[in-house]
Image (cartoon, rainbow, N blue to C red):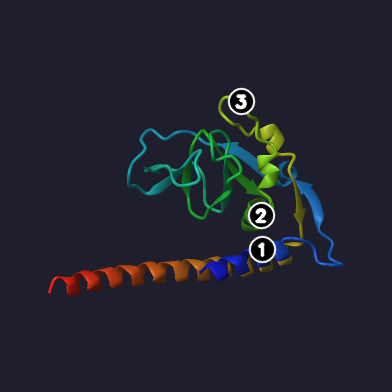
Amino acid sequence: IELRKKQYEYYREELLKPKEGEKWETKTLGEIGKISIGKKPNEILDKGTFEYINAGTTCSGYSETYNFEGDTITTPSRGEGGIGFVGYQKKRFCCGPLCYAIKTSENNKFIYHYLTLHNKLILDLKCEGGVPALNRKDLITIEIQVPPVAVQEKIVHTLDSFETTITTLTTALEVSKKRYEYYRDKMMRF
């Protein structure tokens, strides 16, 4: 798993920069994207239909309502430890008031991969003092190297394949560990 993760990181870095002779455009996030802020749902649940994404790096709960469609990039706008984290929401979700939802005119999954690799661009915009914050007026200035759509799709396909492999290996390892623990406990009861 660790070797696959290193392989993924290597290819992500190689794929997300222009090759010799390729022409990628430099565009700001504000030029290619709409950046919105969410709203707290009436009720945050332990289980529910839609994930509630707010200031953290993981799901903050669930809601029975959503305010954004899937295929959306998210990044916290406030809070300690979350600024710089880039998330990708595949399905409809409820975006909270401490989170930006970003939809672009490009392949959103490509922009997600790009921002994940270059999260220092976001971290450098963080305002310190009291509660760390990321202002929209600064976020829109981030420059992104954008290849043609066909290249974006190829890159996303390759990186998604790596992510699927890592997830599959991680799941298989967890299942094997549980199976081992189950049979170990059974055998120790003799």
Q: Is residue 65 above or below residue 149?
A: above
Q: Going 39% across and 43% down the picture, which residue do you hit?
A: 61
Q: Position of residue 167 (x, y in %)?
A: 48, 66
- Answer left or right for 41 relative to 98: left
Q: Which mark is residue 129?
A: 3
Q: Which residue is mark 1?
A: 12
Q: Position of residue 56 (x, y in %)?
A: 49, 41
Q: Nearer the viewer, residue 145 or 188?
A: 188
Q: Going 38% across and 33% down the picture, which residue do you hit?
A: 42
Sequence-wise first label, 3 or 2? 2
Q: Is residue 99 above or below residue 185?
A: above
Q: Are marks 2 and 1 in contact (CB under 8 Å)?
A: yes
Q: Which mark is residue 117?
A: 2
At mark 2, the secondary structure is helix
- Answer left or right for 108 relative to 79: right
Q: Residues within 10 Å of mark 1 (few under 14, many from 20)?
A: many
Q: Position of residue 41 (x, y in %)?
A: 42, 35
